[in-house]
Each structure stands twice: as C-alpha cells, then as structure tokens.
Image: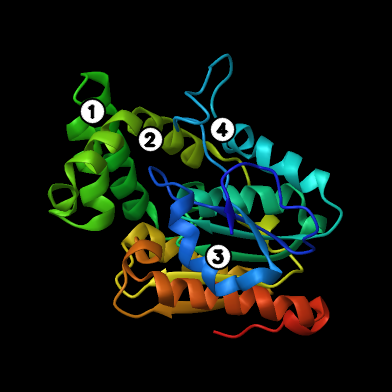
Amino acid sequence: MIHASLEPAPGRRDLVIALHCSGAGPRQWLPLATNLGPDFDLSAPMYFGSEQIGPWPGGTAFSLAEEAASSLSLIDSVGDKVHLVGHSYGGALALHIARVRPERVASLALYEPSAFHLLKQIDGAADAFAEIAEISAKTAASVARGDHCDAARVFIDYWGGTGAWAALRPSVRQALARWVPKATLDFHALFEEPTPLASYTEFDFPVLLLRGEFALRPSRLIVDALAASLPTARLQVVAGAGHMGPLTHPEAVAAAIALRISGSRAIPSAISSSVAR
C-alpha cells in the first residue's frame, strides 16, 4: 500500500520511502508496492509544487535540504532503518537523505539519479553538464515569459524523447504546465548540491543503481561514476528503457528494486557489500 503522506502504517517493521521524479507523484510507485507485498509499508512523499504541499514559500534559496526535511523527520520518527528508493530528481534527493542519515538506511535503490552536481566533478563530463544546463535554461526562459506549456514541452521532450509531450493526454499536459515553475527550482537544487562524490563512497549499506539501456549522456555518466565509486553498489541496466524507465518499464524496474530490498533484509551488510557489476 502506498501512503502519499509521511505517516507510516502502524505495526509495520520495514518502511520504504520512495521518491518520485519531477512532475510525477506517488502513483509512480504502485508497481513497486505490488512487488514488495504486505511485509513493507511504502511512503511516497509529495514535493513542494504539488497541490497537496503547495508552492515553495521562499525566504531562502531552495535546495535538496529543504525538500528532504519532511522525509528526514519521518526517518527520525521510526525506530528501524528504512529503505530509500528514488528516480531522477527523487534519486538525487534520496542520495542527499542517505548522506545525512547513513546510519538509518537499510538499503538504497536509485534509477538514474539526477545528481547533476556530480557532472562538475567527473572528468570528461563538461559537455554533459552543458547539455543539461541548456535544458534548464530553456525551461526557465519559457517559465519567465509565462509560456508554461512550452516550458513543460522542453522538459518532457528531453527526458522522454521528441514527441513525448504531444503524446500525453490533455489533462496530463495541463497538470505539468501548472507544475513546471517548480522545475526551475529543482534544477537549481540539483546543480548547487554541495556534496562531493567522495562523501557517497562511505555508504556501507547495499546500493542498487539502475539505468536504462538508452540513458541520456548526463544520466549515464552520473550512474557510471557512482557505480565505480560506491563500494557496496550493484549496477543493473534495464533493457529497452530510457530515463523514464520506472514509468515505461514499470514491472522490470519494480521487480529489480523489490528484489534488492527484500534481499537486504536477510543479508548482513558485511556480506552484501560485495560489488556485482
């Protein structure tokens, strides 16, 4: 069962916090909830910019730390370790949370985390950083002139491929046009996250890194850098998928994540720290 709020169901011992991509919502994780079954409680927090939470109120510069605050409060309120899952923006958010509370994480599963700050630290990634920075700039320019539909089109067609925006139902396009001003804040937070790559190498819990067979260059470089650097990481490529794999290939992605989470319950961290690539 998915709880879109930050309240876990009573009596559960294993909590999974699943963080969705920008512009999506908790329903993204329905296949994962099904694959996990009744032994797990899945909480899928909403973000600033959603109708449930409302816009970012301002006052300070937006950052992943601001978005992560509610999830960290949930983690601090439960007695056991939690499993973190994230896709795209949610993957970068999960990385941030794991770094802040590493002692409270049982496992981490990331599908193409958009940790764009790492592109500044990876040798040979300047062109990839420029590529995603251009998408950010185009999205922001359309938002600034009030053309939210064009901003959402730029964003969706980059991640989903040319024509992805046009293929969406009108109601979905309308919802994304309402949401897209938040994308500019998300890009800012992802570019300005201060954590160095070396900080993630200290993770001692099982990490599953997933990417699509057709991952775009920025995502591919980020995942490959994390896979090479994290001592407990396992890398898995989803055949036929791109960046939106959790939505286009939900069963394959959900099954891989559920298997990793279930396995981490029974395998001591000292054993599960072996790398399989």
Do the residues under discs 3 and 1 have CB atoms within 8 angstroms? no
Q: Cα distance, mark 4 to mark 2?
A: 12 Å
The picture places residue 83, in percent across and down from the top left corner, at 69, 62
The picture places residue 33, in percent across and down from the top left corner, at 55, 65
- Residue 33's disc is 3
Q: Residue at x 27, y 43 (%)?
A: 155
For marks 4 and 3 on the same chain, the one whose residue lies earlier in the sequence? 3
Q: Of helix, strand and loop, which one carries label 3?
A: helix
For marks 1 and 2 on the same chain, the one whose residue lies earlier in the sequence? 1
**Which marked residue is nearer to the observer: mark 4 or mark 3?**
3
Q: Cα distance, mark 1 to mark 2?
A: 11 Å
Residue neighbourhood size for the residue with mark 2, other residues' Cα within 10 Å, grouped as few (<14), some (14–19), many (≥20): many
- Residue 63's disc is 4
Q: Residue beneath label 2, please?
A: 183
- Residue 268's disc is none
Q: Residue furthest top?
A: 59
For marks 3 and 2 on the same chain, the one whose residue lies earlier in the sequence? 3
Q: Residue at x 71, y 51 (%)?
A: 99
190 horizontally vs 152: left or right: right
For marks 4 and 1 on the same chain, the one whose residue lies earlier in the sequence? 4
- Residue 148's disc is 1
Q: Amino acid at mark 4?
A: Ser
**Which marked residue is nearer to the observer: mark 3 or mark 1?**
3
Above or below, 122 relative to 117? below
Q: Amino acid at mark 1?
A: His
